[in-house]
Image (cartoon, rainbow, N blue to C red):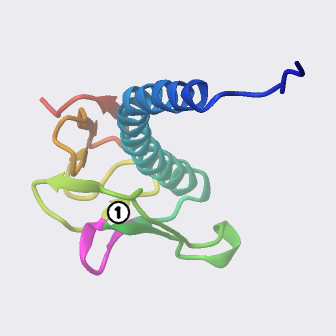
Amino acid sequence: MDRVKGFTLVELMVTIVVAAILLGIAVPSFQTLSRNNAVKATTNDLMSTVNLARQQAMSTRSNIEIRPAAGGWDDGWSLEFTNDAMGEDADFLPKMGVTVARTEGNGALAFFARGGIQGGGAEFTVSHSDTNITSRVFCVSFFGKITQGGCS
């Protein structure tokens, strides 16, 4: 009697069930990781923009602004140079589902030629629409230095 090589229907169904169980466990973990990374990336983008604005303001001895988008910081922000020779203006958007809030005002951050901020410091909170994701808070001092956590 000849034997046919291959899988039986039962073996195939067991394999599909095991794969479905593994995917059911892995997908939620991947979504949480993805959302955490979105908050982290948006925070790093905003912090990098602040550092670049401060650096350029001090090196070129001119004022530079970071302006929120028309709808506020949640809709993004723009780095605006007063002179084209200093660099190109750039627009930034938060990642999907991420919100950015500025405590005490929603206006622009204006850096003076010496690196300080007009009107004092600013505190930013970057969070995700999924409340299980940890928010990130950082403070930009009057002198333009960034520290993790809230302003004290």
The N terminus is located in which quarter?
top right
Report the front residue among 38 and 54: 38
Q: Which residue is mark 1?
A: 110
> Which residue, as the protein is rendered here, is positioned at the far right?
2
Q: Who's the residue at 24% across and 71% down the image? A: 72
Type of amino acid at the residue the image marks with label 1: Ala
Q: Position of residue 32 (x, y in %)?
A: 35, 35
Q: In this rendering, is residue 85 above or below 137?
A: below
Q: Looking at the image, how many numbered discs can be counted on the residues?
A: 1
Report the front residue among 20 and 34: 20
Q: Who's the residue at 60% across and 76% down the image? A: 83
Dominant secondary structure, magenta: strand
The C terminus is located in which quarter?
top left
Q: Who's the residue at 24% across and 45% down the image? A: 127
* Residue numbers of the magenta segment: 66-74
Q: Position of residue 15 (x, y in %)?
A: 56, 26
Element type where label 1 sits in the image = strand
Q: In this rendering, is residue 130 above or below 135?
A: below
